[in-house]
Image (cartoon, rainbow, N blue to C red):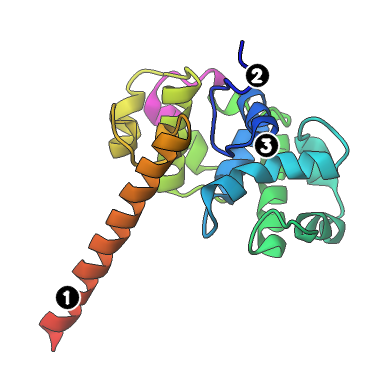
Amino acid sequence: MDPTDHPLRLAQQPEADALLSRSPLAALTGMLLDQQIPMEWAFTGPYTLAERLGGDDLDAHEIAAYDPEAFAELCARKPAVHRYPGSMAKRVQQLCRYLVEHYDGDASAVWRDARTGDELLGRLTALPGYGTQKAQIFLALLGKRLGVRPEGWRETAGAYGEEGSYRSVADITGPETLEKVRAHKQEAKRAAKAAKAAKTSEKH
């Protein structure tokens, strides 16, 4: 098997993608970091953190119990895991504390026995840092790339669950699809800006 052939190709870097593909906590953390920075940077973050913590995976118990200041420093060290390493360090720790409290630190337990898409979406939106949109994208990622497909998952994921779409990280399988998703996002931003400008001119 090609060593770069992982179900997840989000970091566009073999070692980071390998971690995302085998580690549920790394995938959840990458999705958490995926805002206000390029996607590849966000999804490389879990691998960077694992290296700095001295392991080959992330451990929810370890991160939850870590001294907050020291963990923030770990996230801020260059190359930083995010543009806002301090606030994201807090969020990653909150996520891990929640997983320890509700799932004994086992991230895959969030989806392992979910019977329906609705049930899984409910569990994902309950995670710290996960709003509805982020939860729907992650639900689509689980279904499309990782074979986690509870009943009704596509419908629950909304537009992100559609087959053949290029809307989110759930649709990325390599550099080519990454560009398609990026183009879709830019188009959506342009459309939103145009709609906002039209509304403003209506008011005047």
- 107 with respect to 203 (left or right): right
Q: Which of label 3 and label 2 is nearer to you?
A: 2
Crowding around mark 3 (Cα neighbors within 10 Å: few <14, some 14 to 19, many 20+) is many
Judging from the image, what secondary structure is the residue with disc 3 in? helix
For the residue pair 135 and 195, the one nearer the viewer reads as 195
Q: Bounds of the magenta span?
A: 112-121
| Image quarter of residue 61 | top right
| Image quarter of residue 40 | top right
| Image quarter of residue 119 | top left
- Circle 2 is placed at which residue position? 3
Q: Which of label 3 and label 1 is nearer to you?
A: 1
Amino acid type shown at disc 3: Leu
**Where residue 19 is drawn, which disc sits there?**
none
182 above or below 99? below
Magenta stretch, main secondary structure, is: helix
> Which of marks 2 and 3 precedes in the sequence?
2
Crowding around mark 2 (Cα neighbors within 10 Å: few <14, some 14 to 19, many 20+) is few
Question: Percent x, y for residue 65?
Answer: 84, 45
Amino acid type shown at disc 1: Lys
